[in-house]
Image (cartoon, grey):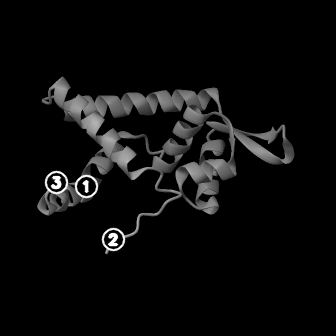
Amino acid sequence: MAERSQYEELARQLSAIGAVKRGLARAMPAECPGGSAAVLSLLAHHGDMRMSRLAELLAVDMSVTSRHVAHVVDRGWVERLPDPDDRRSRMLRLTGAGEEMLDDLGRRTTDMFARTLGDWSAEDVGRLTVLLGRLRDSFGDCRSHPVRPSG
């Protein structure tokens, strides 16, 4: 087990990750903020879904989800379709334009990392990717199981 000071330093480093997130945000087109990008990504990954499922995956309130969805629908990136199982509900579906935007976002993100981490070895990038995935897995699904302080 790591020493307490190592966990404290990890906490400091993770707090400073905001600079990385801001760098990623600057690489994105102004018309596609982070919430919109998350909606597109989740629909691409999970397929058509109801707004309630999207809110669950985003781990945000329905009112926030609704604003994100309105933004992407207004731009033609997502469409609302009748739910075949319940005509009162709507399903969200990624459109061709949404797939194009998602491809553009992927290119921008990849290009930004390539520029910023150009002096990193392939092994270091791979190691970071594996360790970040492991960190995320260690926290599990934090949407349904809030972490409580020990003690």
Q: Residue at x 22, y 33 (%)?
A: 127
* Helix, strand or loop under label 1: helix
Residue indicated by mark 3: 2
Q: Are marks 1 and 3 in contact (CB under 8 Å)?
A: no
Residue in the foreground of this view, choosing between 80 and 59: 59
The residue carrying pointer 2 sits among few (fewer than 14), some (14 to 19) or many (20 or more) residues within 10 Å by Cα, namely: few
Q: Determine the image quadrant of residue 47.
A: top right
What numbered label is drawn on residue 14? 1
x, y percent for residue 149: 35, 70
Q: Between disc 2 and disc 3, whose residue precedes?
A: 3
* Helix, strand or loop under label 2: loop
Q: Residue at x 46, y 63 (%)?
A: 146
* Helix, strand or loop under label 3: loop
Spatial CA span between label 2 and label 1: 20 Å
x, y percent for residue 117: 19, 33
Please name the amino acid that badge 1 sits on. Leu
What numbered label is drawn on residue 150? 2
